Image (cartoon, rainbow, N blue to C red):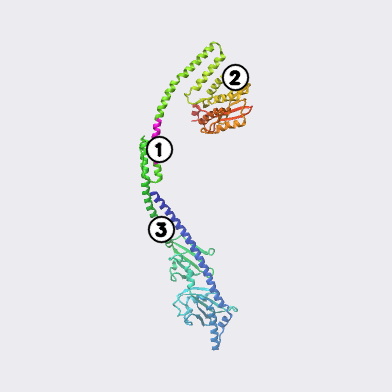
Amino acid sequence: MGCMTGIVILVSILYYNRTLAIIHSKVSDIAEKNISQTAGLFNLMLQGYNSLSKSLNSNYELTRLLQETESNAAVAIMNERTITNIIGAAYYSRNEVVGIHILSENGKVYSYERQFAGVIDNNYAQTDWYKKLQKSSGNMVWLGLYPGSPINTMQQRDKVFVFGRKLYDLTSHKEIGILVIETNPSPIMEAVSNVSISPGTKVYILGEDSKIIASSERIGAKQTELDKIPKPSQDENILVDNTSDRLIVAANTSMAGWTIYGLTPKKDIRAEVFQTTKFLFIVVMVLIILSTVLASIVSRNIASPLKLLIREMKKVEMGNFSGSVNVDSFDEINSLVSSFNRMVHRMDELIETIKISTVSEKNAQLQALQAQVNPHFLYNTLDMIYWMLDEQENERLSRVVLSLSQMFRYSSNWEEASRTTLRCELEQIRHYLTIIETRLGGRLQTEITAGEAWLHVMLPKMTIQPIIENAVKYGLEPLGCRGVLKVSTVAHENKLHIKIEDNGVGMDAQNLERVRTSLSQKQSGGTLKSGQTWARRGIGLRNVHDRLVMMFGETYGLQIDSEIKQGTTVVITIPIPPMKETEDEHIDRG
């Protein structure tokens, strides 16, 4: 439960930190895109307002009528009405326009607005906005948001966005007045709200003089705080600053030279993560409860049966095989307990069987000791015959009797199990060949050549004799003439090859393949057909091959090659043991 809880808490912390970083990155990207879109919207909006003012300034009829001084009152009234109509046409060209005012050089004011038209503030010449327009050189002057109309004293209830420019006679480049346009600030405020990414986001629009033109708060709020905020450069119109306790995004507008700022507190961004944190906390608590329940289930259904099983295993370790475990748990645990009970019961049976086998083995050893009286009696009798023949100078027959005695003694002595050296095996072969050469009357020529370095190599007892017996019986005797039998050794890498060659009758391809197949079969494989020469020959070779494989492994054994009327070659492959290092060599090597 502790491991599970620790892992869950660690994963939750890593997930929380990763989620917070991702959210910060995504919020920064969203804020950057929003302010970029907002700057683009402002540029389009202000470009439309600029086109509206240019359309009035480029109206020839308007500029002509503003410069005329008519003495006739009727004509003057008609001119004023014409000017008002031209202004009215521009007024209705855009829905957000709420007022258009032209302040002529001769002191007249022409207005077209929603209501209370013609109510003019006579002190407008002393206002800041008028002085800004007077100082301009014909470019558009974006005055910003005002709580009401700066010209009409009766229009003070609704906020308006004000901009204007000087009017010139495009022919004589003479100043003819000042154009002031008032618009509904809703499009600007909607664009400002597009920058907000949280309820706590504050949006400011600063003019070229770093003064607040528009804001999501009241105008003029915290001007000193805005002076400390970095501004975007001319090369990079968008600035994103995420190093302080708030996310700052800023963008320049190319049309008006404004800078739009969006200030979002980091705590508002973290508030988005709070729901994730809350969800994670609930998940962790649920997992801890589930872990506790799971730990209880595991303890009751798995740990307890295993403890009982361990306790019984300790009893078995001490030699008590009579115990058993009875539990009711999951199928796997029940299967394990059943297997343990069967194993203990089987071990108890095997121990009893071993006891009986040990007694039987002791009895067999006693019988074997008693049976050794007869071989010794035979050895002594053969030795007595040998000395009697030797005294009669029957050297040939005495040599045969002596060889037979040595062979019988060698084949009957199994005190050193089934292993022997190549030297002893070759000595046994020489005794055997003495008898065979005497029996065949000079029809057998033998050549035994073995390297002195390989005489210490171990191999199974009675390995070479069955092969030579087969060679003589099935290969050389049917030949009907003098035959040659060769025994030699060849070393290759870490293997020793003992070759037994004869120039006898050989075997045809079919019988050779059957003998090879019999050698490649496993020990439990099928037997060869009885009553056939190649079958009887294969049984003896198979026995030798199986003993070699049992002693050295699958890579060792017999290999047979034979051709009809050409003879047979049998190769015995055994491992060469590594050379033993002398004591001095160990000392020299440290």
Above or below for 115 versus 447: below
Tell me where the magenta segment starts and ends, as one range. 338-354
| Residue 339 painted magenta | yes
Residue drawn at (42%, 54%), measured in percent from left and top? Answer: 12
Residue 273 sits in which quadrant? bottom left
Label 2 crowd (10 A; few <14 / some 14-19 / many >=20): few
The mark that comes first in sequence, 1 or 3, is: 3
Near-viewer residue (91 or 457): 457
Q: Which residue is mark 3?
A: 279
The single residue placed furthest to the front in the displayed view is 531
Q: Main secondary structure of the magenta part?
A: helix
353 relative position to 534: left or right: left
Above or below for 310 versus 482: below
Q: Which residue is mark 2?
A: 440
C-alpha separation, residue under disc 1 versus residue under disc 3: 52 Å
Secondary element under disc 1, as helix, strand or loop, is helix
Residue 541 position, x and y percent, is 55, 28
Q: Which residue is mark 1?
A: 343
Residue 368 position, x and y percent, is 44, 23
Residue 402 position, x and y percent, is 53, 17
Near-viewer residue (485 or 122): 485
The mark that comes first in sequence, 3 or 2, is: 3
The mark that comes first in sequence, 2 or 1, is: 1
C-alpha separation, residue under disc 3 versus residue under disc 2: 103 Å
Near-viewer residue (518 or 587): 518
Near-viewer residue (92 or 515): 515
Q: Amino acid at mark 2?
A: Leu
Q: Amino acid at mark 3?
A: Phe
Q: Amino acid at mark 1?
A: Met
Secondary element under disc 2, as helix, strand or loop, is helix
| Residue 136 painted magenta | no
Above or below for 348 versus 127: above
